[in-house]
Each structure stands twice: as structure tokens, then as C-alpha cells.
Image (tube, coloured by chain):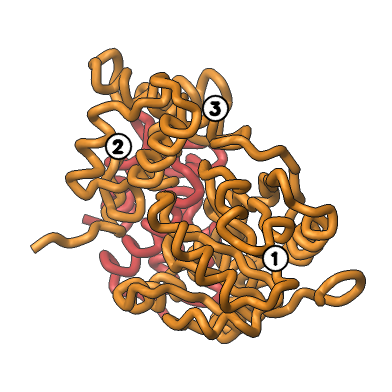
Chain colours: A red, B orange
Amino acid sequence: MNAKDEIRNFLQEHVRSCKLEDSQDIFAEGLVSSMFVMQLVVMVEQKFGISVEGADLNRDHFRSIEAMAAFVTRKQSR
Amino acid sequence: MPSGRMTISSIGVVGAGVMGTGVALALAYTGHRVILLDVAQAALERVKVKLSEDVRTYAVLSGGRFGGMASDALTRIELHDDYEQLGGADFVIENTTEKWAVKEPVYRKLDAVCPPHVVLAVNTSAIPITRLANLTKRSAKVIGTHFMNPVPLMPTVEVIRGTHTSEQTLATTRKLLAQMGKDAIVVNDSPGFVTNRVMMLMINEAIILLQEGVSSAREIDLLFTRCFGHKMGPLETADLIGLDTVLYSLEVLRENLNDVKFEPCSLLRTLVNAGCHGRKSGEGFFAYPSNVVRRA
């Protein structure tokens, strides 16, 4: 399973929407509360073995499936 | 005395639960020295971990506002389990559990260790300020500050003027809140004040609807977020507040207003008894997998 699929599966369990689009902004559309972002940070750290610190702690990296997958790929390639 | 142009710089924060740690961080982010006190050793152990996790959360949620200040903020918070340490505080914010039996001895101790000019601010969502003030020899210096969760991000505080609260105490409190970048809305003392007199009834009724099978938790909340444009539904709000706190608040309202409409519903009691306290325990009306408290 690639990063996008894993993120989509996790989000799908938590968001209040039948089907999530990859580019859908989960915060702007009110699909999750803002506090949910910390669960996303912990999820990507645990699932993908990366560390999210300092400047990485930016909501833009967690806005959508697409944004999260791109962030994970960038971190893994470093 | 920290009044007029002087900055209120050293703040005692009593109780290191969800609200106490939130208040401590909000103060530390805005440059204050914080003496964070909790007599439960287990709470102090937990709070070290919680504070370092919370600074990460707020770095993300604040859109960069608290990002670079994270490590600095933690150095401004001292953890203690001894009331005597509060003797050097300019202002004290008390955040212990919403139960009279818990708060009563705390106010007697605070009155004994804090210099007479120090304001004691009660961070409560329901307990009458005047009743707590009367436990002390400084009732004019006791005021209510009902902070909202998550404290560092919420811009407004419901400030409660007790029967004896002086204008100077109100001015000092407004000044500290301004230093924290927060506005105050001042109301008179009454159980539950304005916010929770309404909010707790709404949450209780939403739980009753769930209990009766009228709708699911998700759909009850969706009606509020989608139809009314609320940021959060009543059940998710309850999870954020803490179901134990919701229960205690309803009990305080029931007792003080002597009105059965505040009777906590049985599903709420069952969840609290089962340790499902909402977001902080990982389970409530919704699941919060990263916060799950492991049970042996």
C-alpha cells in the first residue's frame, strides 16, 4: 500500500464524509476539528517512521491526502 | 503590588490537568514565568510529557505564531508540588477539579501562602466565585476566569465578578489577560455563569438523544456543524471539555440552582465510570486513537 492509500484509509475512519478526494482540505471544509491535526502528526510519524519537528509542524502539510503524502515522500527522501 | 504600568510577570497556576497545563502554556508563550503546582505526583510526571506534546500541537495549530517559541516556553514553566512555592507569585490561577470538596481546602491553603495583595483567579466553569471567595480573608481579591480549551488558541475569557470582587481586582485581571493577548467578557456571579448554564444543558440533552436512539453521535453533531454552522457539535465539545468535567459541572448546577433540568443523564455517568473521559482518555463519544490510555 502506498503512502496516499494508507493516509486515505486512516482519514476515512475519522472524517465525516462518505468519500474523500485527494485534494480536499479537511480543515477548511470542517471535516475534522483543528485538534485532530495532532493525531495526523502522530499517525505519519508512526506509520512512516519519520520525525515531525520544528518547521515541519505546519498545518499546510496536513491539509489533504495529497499534501500529507507529498510531505511524507519529501521527509523519506531526505 | 503589580498594578498600573507594572507587568504581572510571575504567575502561579494550581492544578496540572487539561486546563492548568493549557493556562500554563498560554502564559509561558506570552513571556510569563509560571509556577505550575499539582500535589499529585502522578500528575506532575504526566505533565512533563503532555507539555512537550502540546507545544507541538500548538506549533501546528497556531499557524506559526507559537512555532519558534516552543522550546523557550517550556523553560519558563517550573513544576512544583509544594504550595509554599506560590509565595513568590504576583497572581494565581486555580484550575483544580470542578468539585467543591476539592476546591475548598485549596483556597484555604492559597490564602495562607499567598501575600495579601495577590489576586486568586478561579478557573471554573460552574462553581460560584463568591462562595469560594468567602473561604478566604481576601474576598475582594477573588475573581472568576473561565478560560476556554484549548487555552493558548482561544482569544476570549469569561470573567466572573463575585459579589465582593473589587474594581482593582477586575482591572488587574484584565491587565493580565491583555498581556496574554486575550479579551475579557465580564459577567456577574451565578452557577455556570452564562456559557455553561446554557452549554451543559445542551450537551446533556444531546447525550439523552443519543441514549434514546433518536440519532447517532456523528449525526447529532453533524446537525449542529452543518445546519447551524457551529465549529463543533455538542458531543465532540463534551469530549474536548472532558466527560468527567461535564458531569461535575452538571452536578454543581443541579445542586446550586436546585433544578432537576440539570440532572446528568445515565449514559454520561456510565461513560465517566468506565473511564471514557473524552479526548484526554482516548475515548468518549468519538475515538481519539493517539490519546488512548492503556488499561492493564
Whether residue A69 appears in this view of the structure is: no
Q: Mark 1 points at which residue?
A: B119
Left or right: residue B69 compared with residue B267 = right
Q: Mark 1 lies on which chain?
A: B
Expressed as whole percent of the image width and height from the top left, the position of residue B49 reads 37, 75
| CA–CA distance in space, label 1 to label 2 | 38 Å
Residues at marks 3 and 2 on the same chain: yes
* Residue toward you, A5 or B85: B85
Instruction: State if disc 2 and disc 1 touch (CB < 8 Å).
Output: no
* Residue drawn 35% across the image and 71% down it: B43
Residues at marks 3 and 1 on the same chain: yes
Expressed as whole percent of the image width and height from the top left, the position of residue B223 reads 45, 20
Q: Mark 3 lies on which chain?
A: B
Q: Name the residue under label 3.
A: B198
The first of marks 1 and 2 along the sequence is 1
Q: Residues within 10 Å of mark 2 (few under 14, many from 20)?
A: many
Left or right: residue B151 compared with residue A9 = right
* Residue toward you, B39 or B43: B39
Expressed as whole percent of the image width and height from the top left, the position of residue B2 reads 81, 75
Residue mark closest to the camera, 3 vs 1: 1
The first of marks 3 and 2 along the sequence is 3
* Residue drawn 64% across the image and 66% down it: B64
Of the 4 image quadrants, the one containing the C terminus of chain B is bottom left
Q: Name the residue under label 2.
A: B285
Q: Which chain carries label 2?
A: B
* Residue toward you, B140 or B63: B140
The first of marks 3 and 1 along the sequence is 1
Expressed as whole percent of the image width and height from the top left, the position of residue B200 reads 46, 31
